Image (tube, grey):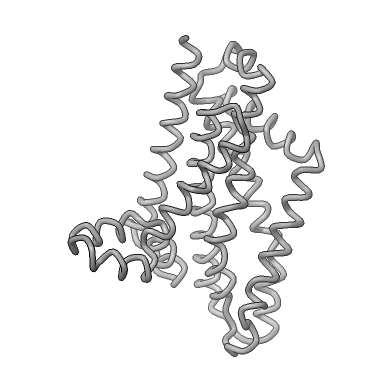
Amino acid sequence: MSGFWAVFKRELKGYFATPVAYVFLVIFLFFAGYLPFRDGFFEIRQADLRLFFDTLPLLFVFMVPSTAMRLWAEERKSGSIELLLTLPITVPQAVWGKFAAAWAFLGIALALTFPLPLVVNYLGDPDWGQLMTGYLGAFLMAGGFLAIGSFFSAVTKNQVISFILSVSACAVIVYAGNPSTLNYLSSTISPAVVGVLENISLQTHYEAIMRGVIELKDVAYFVILIAVWVYACTLILEERKAS
């Protein structure tokens, strides 16, 4: 575990050692605050953050890959990955350490949206349990997107290519379960396939948690999603280390 914590602390400190992290936080907080109010936050006359949580999948599709693209692509481009992989730590420790640091950074970004719940609480009497489950779902979704981004960052040393591939993959697993997408596909493919697409869509499980209902199948979906993509990232780097 010492290797994991060494990588975790190194990576997390690295985020705040350059202006990039602060620029990311400013952009994220701007859109996180702007989009819900643009979509009629006051017009719905409900003391909740439904509009905020509804906008997060689209926001995360672009913001999370921008965080993940540097995880391994930058190491490969600079050549520092060779040094990292020769240190007395295992590849899984390095992968999970970097992933955990980036996930913690995204958690900090989410935590900085705390003025929104305070505004909702000032305007009415929100369901704090539902607010907390909404944030839990958002944090898990960020982890899922980050795991996908980590994999594509390990595949290529070009950060732009990593970003494009990550955005594409994240968009697919989000909008595969979109009602309009499912309605369109239902006229061309079998209902069984449509049902499978709905079940593997991140949007379906995220919305279930966002409604305040935490079920094992929804949490398990995100845990499996993260584990599979991080494991795939580990395999890529293990192969690179062995070659």
Residue at 30 percent across and 57 percent down: it is: 197
Residue at 52 percent across and 66 percent down: it is: 134
Can you give x and y, in whole percent of width and height, for residue 107 in the image?
62, 51
Q: Quadrant of residue 97?
A: top right
Can you give x and y, in whole percent of width and height, for residue 231 in the image?
42, 31
- Residues 187 and 57: in front is 187
Question: 180 left or right of 240?
Answer: left
Residue at 72 percent across and 70 percent down: it is: 115
Residue at the front extreme of this rendering: 188
Question: 72 left or right of 11?
Answer: left
Classify 201 as above or below 94: below
- Residues 106 and 236: in front is 236
Question: 128 left or right of 235?
Answer: right
Residue at 66 percent across and 46 percent down: it is: 105
Quadrant location of the N terminus in the rendered image: top right
Q: Total number of numbered labels?
A: 0
Classify 21 as above or below 5: below
Can you give x and y, in whole percent of width and height, for residue 120 in the image?
65, 79
Classify 241 as above or below 63: above
Can you give x and y, in whole percent of width and height, for residue 196 in the image?
25, 56
- Residues 187 and 199: in front is 187
- Residues 234 and 100: in front is 234
